[in-house]
Image (spheres, grey):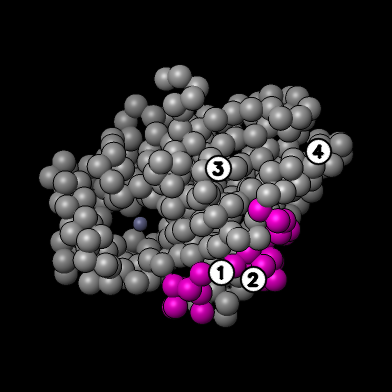
Amino acid sequence: MAEAEASVLYAVPAPGVARVTLNRPQRKNAQNVELLYALDAAFQRAARDPAVKVVILDAAGDTFSSGHDLSADADSPLEGFNLVGLWADFQAPGQEGQMGREWEIYLGLCERWRSLPKPTIAQVQGKCIAGGLMLAWVCDLIVAGETASFQDPVVAFGICGAEYFMHPFELGARRAKDWLFTSDWLSAEEARQVGMVSRVFPDAELAAETLSLAQRIAQKPLFALKMAKEAINQSQDAAGRRTALLQSFSIHQLCHSHWRSIHGVPVDPSGLPPKLREGIYDYFRKVEDGR
Ligand code: ZN
């Protein structure tokens, strides 16, 4: 595949800084499986290049990421990709196949990316929705353009929240509940106030300011950066982050299983706009037929 057509781009815009770019702007950077494993390959490349000290994750187009790709190519088989876990039998009936699939492509990949032992910066412009949040949340810093906004609307269709359930850790418990219960948008400035976003820049200056920030960080000793990251990540895990994440993932699977038992599809279609509702039925019918 030509570089210009790749779903993830890789560049070194300054010494010590790698830039990984989500490159499906025509799909609002919705995540299909191909994009997720291309992203994993790009993160591996940055991790293994001793000249890279800081990684920026940005996105082409006007949207950081619209979430999981619920279109025709989103249910592609996982076999053939470089899987990061040992879950398998992704075509198993009931909740078994879907749980294994979501463990692999959401929880497994996200936890792996969170542990990339170099500083990572998500550079968010435009909208960041549901599954899009997981790509921002795995990064160490999130910087945003002033018109960026964040939303996880999945409660509207019967699910407790996106699979990578970092909501209470990112927003605090009460704000996270308010945000999930209402499906409201969180502005860049509101996200900064709750601590989810560390810096907000004018949209036109976002890329340059993010690169400048990355270059400042890249001046520090890499080993110290790795250890600072590790110390804070371990502090979060000592406080129960990973345990809560795994429990919330199981609750997420309970939600899918509940709606599957009632509607035959793993979400509640009644909360969706009519056009999307039909699409959801068609999509999951096709997934089920493939099993
Ligand atoms: Zn799910």
The numbered mark at residue 186 is 1
Residue 200 or 152: which is nearer the viewer?
200
Give the amino acid type for the residue marked by disc 1 in the picture.
Leu
Q: Which residue is at 21% across, 50% downward?
A: 283
The numbered mark at residue 104 is none
Q: Earlier in the sequence, mark 2 or mark 3?
A: 3
x%, y% of residue 112? 55, 42
Is 129 above or below relative to 26?
below
The numbered mark at residue 190 is 2
State yes or no: Cβ of the residue under disc 2 lies below 8 Å from any atom of ligand 1: no
Q: Which residue is at 55% across, 62% downward?
A: 149
x%, y% of residue 2? 45, 19
Q: Earlier in the sequence, mark 1 or mark 4?
A: 1
Q: Earlier in the sequence, mark 4 or mark 2?
A: 2
Q: Are marks 1 and 4 in contact (CB under 8 Å)?
A: no
Which region of the structure is painted magenta?
Answer: 178-203
Give the amino acid type for the residue marked by disc 2 in the picture.
Glu
Q: Is residue 244 among the parts visible in the rendering?
A: no
Q: Which residue is at 60% across, 35% downward?
A: 20
Q: Give yes or no for residue 117 being in the magenta stretch.
A: no
Determine the CA span between mark 3 and mark 4: 19 Å
Determine the CA span between mark 2 and mark 1: 6 Å
Q: Earlier in the sequence, mark 1 or mark 3?
A: 3
Callout 2: SS: helix
Q: Are marks 4 and 2 in contact (CB under 8 Å)?
A: no
Q: Which residue is mark 3?
A: 59
Instruction: Please state the quadrant of the image where ligand 1 appears.
Output: bottom left
Q: Which residue is mark 4?
A: 215
x%, y% of residue 219? 86, 37
Callout 4: SS: helix
